[in-house]
Amino acid sequence: MKQLQFQNGDKIPTIGLGTWKSKPGEAKDAILTAVKNGYRHIDCAAIYGNEKEIGEAFNELFSNNIVKREALFITSKLWNDKHKEADVIPALKQTLADLQLDFLDLYLIHWPVAMKKDANPPEFLSLDEVPLLETWNQLIKAKTEGLCKHIGTSNFSIKKLNHLNTESSQKVEMNQVELHPFFAQHDLKEWCDGEGILMTAYSPLCSADRSEDFKKADEPQLFENETLKELASNHNCTIAQVVLAWNQYRGICAIPKSTNPGRQVENLSSDQVILTEADVNKINTLHINYRIIDGSFWTENPFYTKANLWDID
Ligand code: A2P
């Protein structure tokens, strides 16, 4: 199993199991089969609404001695409505209780977007009112207290990462972002390499199972792409394996979601696919700057726009 390394030498398996969109009633079995089939990296988040069910799976795996806690790398993420200083550590403790764990391997700020605590419907707060640095300093505290081993962000731009890195006592260790052949994140990867920040690709297979409300008619189709089909045929493997092997070639973790045991195994064994530099260059030509998660659901309020969310012009 390929792994990436944090600055302190700790390792993270490059392929993890994504749990976003794993439905209630499916998430527990997905974890049980994945771990039994060799997965050692599981990606979770409070907002996915399935951490209690995933916690039951962890408990079953540990109490039946199928795997030791230390052998798993478990990530979770802080939701937007728990960004205030007083709310961060309680939210992390709730996640630990739900997942039935004593510590996380990695805790991330899910979005650079703040909301009022427990408000339903959500009420947005500006980043002037709840600065990202306030939230980040609580993640640093959580790490110091041993609640999590590593800390990082998700959906953060270079500008926001740089702000945290220059204004706090602890650099960001991981940034999890949308990343697939149509949105390759070359600039962010280069910058993160320079800062020693690891990266994880979410929606590495373009998340076809996400809500129809957020799909556009002109979306590029990963599994119908001719270049990827040709590479899969050349390597006698599947398109999913080619795409996940491309991530690994670039030194990026990927967290494909699957609740299907066969596809879980297929995705994990992508590390057997050895791409050449020419293959990788071919895949790199597919980048068309196409975000499938464009953040438009955060922008119907006075504080957030696509421009200030992603720090683009
Ligand atoms: P399923 O859970 O039924 O396997 P992403 O990780 O980009 O969010 O994509 C998840 C979607 O891709 C889900 O619909 C998942 O379906 C599907 N998927 C996961 N692995 C594969 C694979 N190897 N081949 C085809 N589809 C896959």
Image (tube, rainbow, N blue to C red):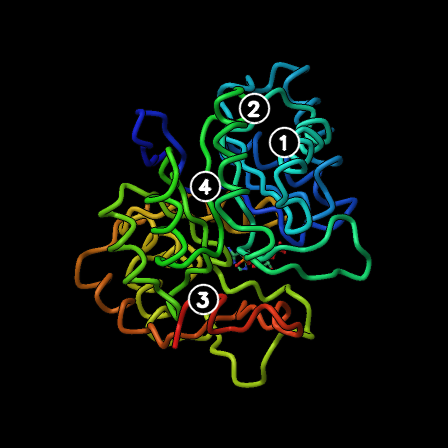
User: Which is more foreground, mark 4 or mark 1?
Assistant: 1
Foreground residue, 195 or 64?
195
- Do labels 3 and 2 touch, CB within 8 Å? no
18 in relation to 205, above or below: above
- Residue 16, image x and y in percent? 49, 41
Residue in view at x 60 percent, y 19 percent = 66
Local SS, label 1? helix
Q: Amino acid at mark 1?
A: Ile
Q: Secondary structure at mark 2?
A: loop
Tags 2 and 1 touching, CB below 8 Å: yes
Along the horizontal axis of the image, is 222 left or right of 43?
left
Badge 4 vs badge 1, beta-carbon distance below 8 Å: no
Outermost residue to the front: 129
Point 54% across, 32% down: residue = 74
Q: Which residue has dot 4 on it? A: 152
- Residue furthest to the right in view is 120
Circle 4: element type: strand
Residue designated by label 3: 310
- Between the C-alphas of marks 4 and 3, the distance is 17 Å
Label located before the other in sequence (2 or 1): 1
User: Viewer-nearest of labels 2 and 1?
Assistant: 1
Q: Amino acid at mark 3?
A: Trp
Under mark 4, the amino acid is: Gly
Sequence-earlier tag: 4 or 3: 4
Instruction: Identify residue for label 1.
Output: 89
Residue type for callout 2 = Leu
Q: Is residue 310 left or right of residue 96?
A: left
Q: Which residue is mark 2?
A: 147
Identify the mark nearer the N-term, 3 or 2.
2
